[in-house]
Amino acid sequence: MPVATLLVSCRDRTGLVAALSDFVFRHGGNIIDLDQHSETAPGESTGTFLMRLVFDTAGMRLDQQGIRTAISVLAQSHDLTTDLSFSDRRPKVAVFCSTVPHCLYDLLLAQSLGDLAGDIVAVVANHDSLRGVAEHFSLPFHFLPIGQDKLADEAKQEALLTELGIDLVVLARYMQILSPGFVSRWQGRIINIHHSFLPAFVGAKPYHQAKERGVKLIGATAHYVTAELDQGPIIEQDVARVSHKDDVASLIRKGRDLERRVVTRAVRLHLDRRVLVSGNRTVIFG
Amino acid sequence: MPVATLLVSCRDRTGLVAALSDFVFRHGGNIIDLDQHSETAPGESTGTFLMRLVFDTAGMRLDQQGIRTAISVLAQSHDLTTDLSFSDRRPKVAVFCSTVPHCLYDLLLAQSLGDLAGDIVAVVANHDSLRGVAEHFSLPFHFLPIGQDKLADEAKQEALLTELGIDLVVLARYMQILSPGFVSRWQGRIINIHHSFLPAFVGAKPYHQAKERGVKLIGATAHYVTAELDQGPIIEQDVARVSHKDDVASLIRKGRDLERRVVTRAVRLHLDRRVLVSGNRTVIFG
Amino acid sequence: MPVATLLVSCRDRTGLVAALSDFVFRHGGNIIDLDQHSETAPGESTGTFLMRLVFDTAGMRLDQQGIRTAISVLAQSHDLTTDLSFSDRRPKVAVFCSTVPHCLYDLLLAQSLGDLAGDIVAVVANHDSLRGVAEHFSLPFHFLPIGQDKLADEAKQEALLTELGIDLVVLARYMQILSPGFVSRWQGRIINIHHSFLPAFVGAKPYHQAKERGVKLIGATAHYVTAELDQGPIIEQDVARVSHKDDVASLIRKGRDLERRVVTRAVRLHLDRRVLVSGNRTVIFG
Amino acid sequence: MPVATLLVSCRDRTGLVAALSDFVFRHGGNIIDLDQHSETAPGESTGTFLMRLVFDTAGMRLDQQGIRTAISVLAQSHDLTTDLSFSDRRPKVAVFCSTVPHCLYDLLLAQSLGDLAGDIVAVVANHDSLRGVAEHFSLPFHFLPIGQDKLADEAKQEALLTELGIDLVVLARYMQILSPGFVSRWQGRIINIHHSFLPAFVGAKPYHQAKERGVKLIGATAHYVTAELDQGPIIEQDVARVSHKDDVASLIRKGRDLERRVVTRAVRLHLDRRVLVSGNRTVIFG
């Protein structure tokens, strides 16, 4: 008995909730969770309607294709941007990593505990050193080094993603910058973990920057990858308190704890269909 | 152009969101914010439907009385528990205090900054020492001491509350325990701030208890007052980190900062109609 | 029976703690609190010795002048940078503000509760609107507007500070940028509260910037003022969680709560002599 | 070049810091970190002297046995309780677990990243299900079931601990209550993780209790095990925010994240010799 999750954004207008909830009701579904908010951004005259609607399809007189068609008709007539998914179609996730294991462990442990509404089906790495971690969790490990001809090597990665039917790529401290082409083809489907509280400390060595600047909190930020480095829509952030007794090594250790929690939370939010990208920001239905 | 806020709880059933949103739409209203969740408590077979619905009544073809009647018809036909309010009827609040001023200042400052969706109209105290605070914020100060005949003195307090048309009483470190009669007559309409992370450290001198037990975090809890001391439905809580360098005086100072923030947040949640009491728990629509 | 607090920084070397603690002991004092740490910054070969030493002078056979002389001899022979203060010489503080009252209230309330190891003796403002707040707390309010001739107007402010023997200036949402001359004359003695998590969102309208960037946490930063705007040594920071339901007005409200707590904590740290400025960073002895 | 860490507690008295720092200096050592605080508990007339002293022994003219003897002479003459350790003698840790892996993973990952100042040398379990986790991290797994004759089975566990020279036992969600004898023989050397913010929700099923009580924060507490269940000295605690949307399953998931972080932090604090037990409380030198 799958559950459907519908994300909606559009220009605000009356009757949208009524139309959508009536649709669910008329066909015998039951709304489990509904979160709707209309926001008017600074400087805008009309608001944006934002909604997440979760409904049980068990008693519905439409099959999934029927629901999909009906929603798409509604979307056209009301000029909605929609994203519909069913819980029995679990998204497939590939985790990209290099040599540091903490984010990888966190994601694979979450999966093995049944905490994710999706399936990590592959670990892809440009170094061979984390093979044992993937294998311990019974996951295929794909060692795809990135050499001189980066585009050719990336093509192999993308071919693998296509072959496996991947829906989401997670860069779990993957120490390569993806090419603009890769990024644009996977827009909204690549999550990166940056080891600072963005937009503070963009770029390399953020813990060194943090130590240098003498901040009292360090952070981590999970965001969708866009062409501009460290500028994509932010999904989740968190911080931890530090002091002058923390040297860079200790900042890195505290940062690891932040990074893994933040990336796993962001992946969970994405897989739970709680993230709606609106321009360069995300709306998180918490 | 007032905004209406409707809180609903009932046994879960299909069609409830559709019925309520359709009602708003048919009469020309616009839903601004809707948060609905169905929860099945541990050990229960049927879920509870919980909803907060905020709608703009500007374009509606019903006046407030009409809306109220229609909602009450819906409530009866669908067996709903409802709470309907309109933003142009601002709740009236009385703050009770004794001698410590920090929570009182916080509430009155919030009010003077326009941060509250209600009006603090009176300060009631069993000591005269905070009169200057009330007067500074241009509020009437009612010095009503509690003596030997507590019930008679409380009767004066209640008479004042009735006379002023008070909707909510906030115990801002008010150092008296209200009688069961008072509490039962004002059920769900008295907020207290307790200076610990309940249910830890019930009763008197919680900071001494915290120091004694050697906890690493201290807390504060805002809750509705019920007949059983410190046992009412919790609205809001927060904590702060402490160490062995904090003596009791320093715990009290850190605690003050928690208490005032927590009580003001709880009052704001209540006045924003974001709190629904369900049994001995609250549902907070965040 | 005053308590002495000594802050020390120097190139790390053996025997420093022994020399200093032996000095206290030999003259009959008692160490109450000692926090010492040696740090080697990234890229440096020799470490920095950092210490805060608090000792009770009650039983000492030296008077304050004697202690001061002895410490200064020790400082010279060991090449130490020292800062010595006695608890019976309470620092005098001036609070600068403009029109928003929340930080001012927080500081004055802390003072009236006896929470500060110093005395706010004056409120200085370039608008007249917060006069009532100062007077409520029985503090002189100095209305010194800043007009076309800013340097001349600042000269009046500085003359007042000198006349009052001010040790610390707190910019409590003071909406003027101090001239470089003012700043340099008061180096390490002006604390500002910036309404963002620095170094994110330098400059004006940080809450608008935060909304625009879609961050999930907003922050506030208290720092010493230096010639470069928002770049001075950071004393204290904190953050609060936000969501898409927060519009700019709500971010500003949440931010106010952060700002006042952060500025008051920073002032308390400074007055407790827990802050040692080392280059462009602070060392906080917590 | 090992580093020595000395923890000291005693009745407060003048000259203690001088005596101890002078000892280090005279023998050619260098103090790296010193944290000293004197606290007077509520109701007590004399204070307690608490100190953590870390010094580099590289240049010292005493070997470790010499240092140990000298400290013990000092301890006797000054009536000190001392705990001296050297960084080249890394404590040996045994992790006890049952079937849930999250705390075990966290500890073993911390170890494999070089984050612990000690060595986990054995995993002991009363179920066989986590064998693969231990083996993945190349650690011996000891399956020692607890049956009807609990004391006999515990005797086998203790024999193993003795044989391995274990210094610290960590109960990483080990689902057995140790017998009073075991606990008393290992006093101050067993860390347990309790899945609530103690003293709230003592005993079984704390997340169910938390859901029932409607708290807004859930917590986890790491403490030394004493004969009284959940009453031992607290080492570390943390909390996470929850809402009515969290069912018990979701509280358990959020709790897992807390538990593993809190237990690993507590173990790190213990191994870094930052924990001093004083009565039923701990002093944490942060």
Image (tube, coloured by chain):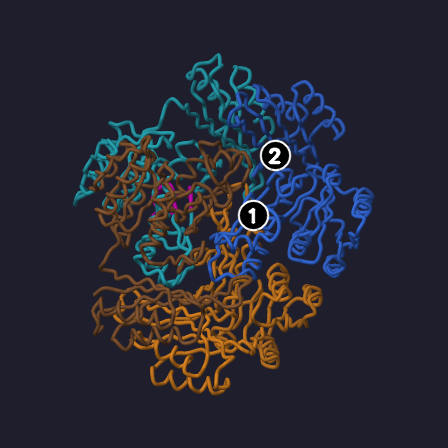
Chain colours: A cyan, B blue, C orange, D brown
Quadrant location of the C terminus of chain B in the rendered image: top right
**Residue A78 versus residue C102: which sits nearer the camera?**
C102
Please give the residue where the numbered disc 1 appears in the rendered image: B201
Callout 2: few (<14), some (14-19), or many (20+) C-alpha neighbours within 10 Å?
Answer: some
Classify residue D273 by image quadrant. Answer: bottom left
Please check the rendered image and state whether residue C43 is part of the magenta-colored stretch, yes or no: no
* Tag of residue B280: 2
- Magenta-highlighted residues: A221-237
Helix, strand or loop under label 2: loop
Q: Position of residue C49 (x, y in %)?
A: 34, 72
- The reply, left or right, for residue D65 in relation to residue C180 is left
Residue at coordinates 39% horizontally, 35% vertically from top-left? Answer: A268
Q: Position of residue D46 (x, y in %)?
A: 50, 68
Callout 1: few (<14), some (14-19), or many (20+) C-alpha neighbours within 10 Å?
Answer: many
Quadrant location of the N terminus of chain B in the rendered image: top right
Helix, strand or loop under label 1: loop
Residue at coordinates 30% horizontally, 30% vertically from top-left? Answer: A166
